[in-house]
Image: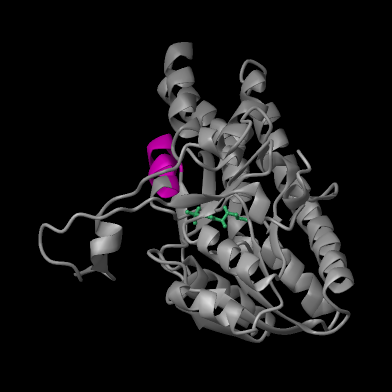
Amino acid sequence: MKTIEWRQESSGCAMILLDQTLLPTQVETLEARRIDQLVDAIQRLVVRGAPALGVVGALGVGLILDQASREAWDRERIEAEIDRLRNARPTAVNLAGGVDRVRPLVPVGLEAVVEVGLMMAQEDEANNREMGKRGADYLLATIADRPLTLLTHCNTGSLATTAWGTALGVVRELHARGKIKEVFADETRPLLQGARLTAWELQADGIGYRVLPDGAAASAILGGLIDAALIGADRIAKNGDSANKIGSLAVALACEAAAIPFLVVAPESSIDRATPNGDGIEIEFRSDEEVTTFAGKRTAPLGAKAYNPAFDVTPAKYITAIVTEKRVYHPEQGESL
Ligand code: MRU
């Protein structure tokens, strides 16, 4: 099933999103026809993952133009709705990047915006396949040309992109070459993108995996069970500092201590060269309930407060390599992007 689909009919336009809040137990789609529905879907993580949000940002501008023509919005309202979409989640630079890429086409019209949005989806898959090859080549050359055991965090697969995936694209490429022994998928508290989504994708592809609690990653790494860890990125600063799902930094520190590679796999569009280092990356904080409840049931005492940053920043000095569709950067060695 597709993560994101665009439908254009005489009755209007719609974005069809595979509802990632329901996976893996229910496979259902959500149809967004109005910008309110789309912003809500982005904020509830119906659709998520930086590259997927880039495409949603671009096509979302199309949805705004469609609603604007149905409801006779003026230019001011259109611009305000585009800003609301752009700011729906602050950390993933791709969302703002997708919106900004099509914004100059707003005066040209809906068709021009949608054409670029759909082109971005195609580019995304091509980029992911390229990153997959580069990442696989890199790991086999730097570790050993044998089946590898890799650790992943969050979900970086088809669900976080439009197809194939970034870090999980490397896993898929290695699997296709017969070079995956096993994948350790961090469950990824508190919303379980690893347990629910990465495991679902790995299972569908017949790739051997185990889900582990985030707290077990360090001992698995220091215990010698893991050859390398791979993550995606929501925003990479010019010096290589990389923001990704909360818990990524702990994985990087364990890899540093164990002297195994820690790779960030992300498209060039996730690099924010206007931000010199990680201090300038805005981190999204989410509701206390995501931490104080589990599957709708309270797990912490009534009134308990939470600390719930959705992302952390891994300093460049702990990143062995950043793999993009264009090249492999070596931030650990002081290479700037
Ligand atoms: O909050 P999420 O699920 O949108 O967070 C996503 C991640 O942190 C991903 O690892 C990141 O966007 C890279 S996706 C290829």
Q: Report which quarter residue 170 is drawn in.
A: bottom right
**Secondary structure predominantly adopted by residues drawn in magenta:** helix
Q: Report which quarter residue 137 is drawn in.
A: bottom right
Q: Quadrant of ligand 1?
A: bottom right
Magenta span includes 332: no
Percent across and percent down for residue 12 are 52, 37
User: On the rendered structure, is 184 left or right of 306?
Assistant: right
Residue that sits furthest to the left in the current view: 302
Percent across and percent down for residue 250 are 51, 63
Asked if 62 appears above or below 49 in the picture, the reply is above
Q: Residue at x 65, y 56 (%)?
A: 318
| Figure colour scheme | one colour
Asked if 16 appears above or below 231 in the picture, the reply is above
Asked whether residue 256 appears in the rendered view, the answer is yes
Q: Residue at x 49, y 26 (%)?
A: 82
Asked whether residue 165 appears in the rendered view, the answer is no
Residue nearest the observer in this picture, 298 or 120 = 298
Location of the C terminus (image quadrant) = top right
Magenta span includes 35: yes
Q: How many marks?
A: 0
Magenta-tinted stretch: 33-42
Percent across and percent down for residue 259 are 69, 70
Asked if 229 appears above or below 203 in the picture, the reply is above
Residue nearest the observer in this picture, 79 or 161 = 161
Location of the N terminus (image quadrant) = bottom right
